[in-house]
Amino acid sequence: MDFNLLFFNISTGEIIIVMLMVFIIFGPGKIPEIAKKLGRALYEVKRASSDIKREIDVEVRKMEQKESKPKPKEAEDTPPESK
């Protein structure tokens, strides 16, 4: 079964090779620390992106509300004509 990550097109075999390289380079003692830091970083990125998305949604709603408000008619602004 070949699993590909969305944007990077990395297969399962390549992920295993990268994990082995990390294990060899950093050793078993540092891996939990690295995983914890990586998890925190991913959490911060996810939180920041959801904050940005929320701000964009709020601004879009404000713009839609401004566009949907009825425009004042010119007839209401001008005094009625006398006969």
Image (spheres, rainbow, N blue to C red):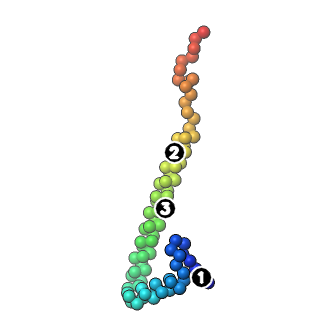
Q: Quadrant of the N terminus?
A: bottom right
**Marks 1 and 2, Cα distance to the nearest angstrom?**
45 Å
Residue 63: image tag: 2
Q: Are marks 1 and 3 in contact (CB under 8 Å)?
A: no
Q: Amino acid at mark 2?
A: Met
What amino acid does circle 3 point to?
A: Ser
Which dot, 1 or 3, sits closer to the camera? 1
Residue on which the image places disc 3: 50
Counting from the top left corner in percent of width and height, residue 68 is at 57, 40
Is 83 located above or below residue 16 in the figure?
above
Task: Please indicate whether residue 6 sits to the left or right of residue 31 in the image.
Answer: right
Identity of the residue drawn at 55% across and 30% down: 72
Name the residue that disc number 1 marks.
2
Secondary structure of the residue carrying tag 2 is helix
Mark 1 or mark 3: which comes first in sequence? Answer: 1
Quadrant location of the C terminus in the rendered image = top right
Distance in Å between CA atoms under marks 3 and 2 = 20 Å
Sequence-wise, the earlier of marks 1 and 2 is 1
- Classify mark 3: helix, strand or loop: helix
